[in-house]
Image (cartoon, rainbow, N blue to C red):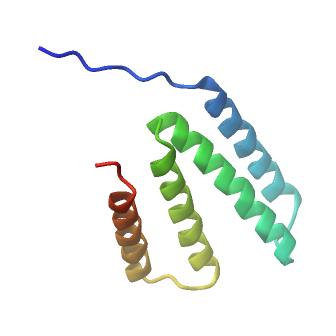
Amino acid sequence: MRQLRRSKKHVLWLICGLVTGGLTAWFTYKFYPDNAFNITLFFCLLEGTILSLTYYLLNNVRRSIFIGFGIGIWLLLRLLGLHQLLYLILIVACLLSLDLLFSKK
């Protein structure tokens, strides 16, 4: 029976994700989203948090980027008032097709 190879989890990505998560929480508590700069900075901090934590959990850069941008796009659509379930289904379909396109097989 062949043994599975365990991949190393990098604790640095967990620490980076927790720090950016704390920065995101502090930013949402301290600043009101009244201009485009605050909203842009919030989405950048949120993307950093999601990318770091999903990379730590999945140990796969490509999928963590897709998950991070998918959640970011979905939240941006919610901010713009587009609440239909069809948008979420389209985002998931696009991300799955991109994952298949960029897979090594």
Q: Which residue ends up furthest to the front in the rendered image?
A: 105
Please name the residue shown 62% across and 32% down the image. Answer: 14
In this image, 43 relative to 95: left or right? Answer: right
In this image, 39 relative to 15: left or right? Answer: right
Please name the residue shown 43% across and 80% down the image. Answer: 87
The answer to whether 19 is drawn above or below residue 48 in the figure is above
- From the top left corner, tell me how far across and down residue 85 is, in percent: 39, 79
The answer to whether 40 is drawn above or below residue 7 in the figure is below
- From the top left corner, tell me how far across and down residue 27 is, in percent: 82, 55
- From the top left corner, tell me how far across and down residue 69 is, in percent: 56, 62
The answer to whether 44 is drawn above or below residue 40 in the figure is above
Is 25 in front, or is 43?
43
- The image quarter containing residue 94 is bottom left
- The image quarter containing residue 47 is bottom right
Please name the residue shown 70% across and 44% down the image. Answer: 21
Counting labels gives: 0
Is 44 in front, or is 25?
44
- From the top left corner, tell me how far across and down residue 17 is, in percent: 66, 39
Question: Where, quadrant-wise, is the N terminus in this rendering?
Answer: top left
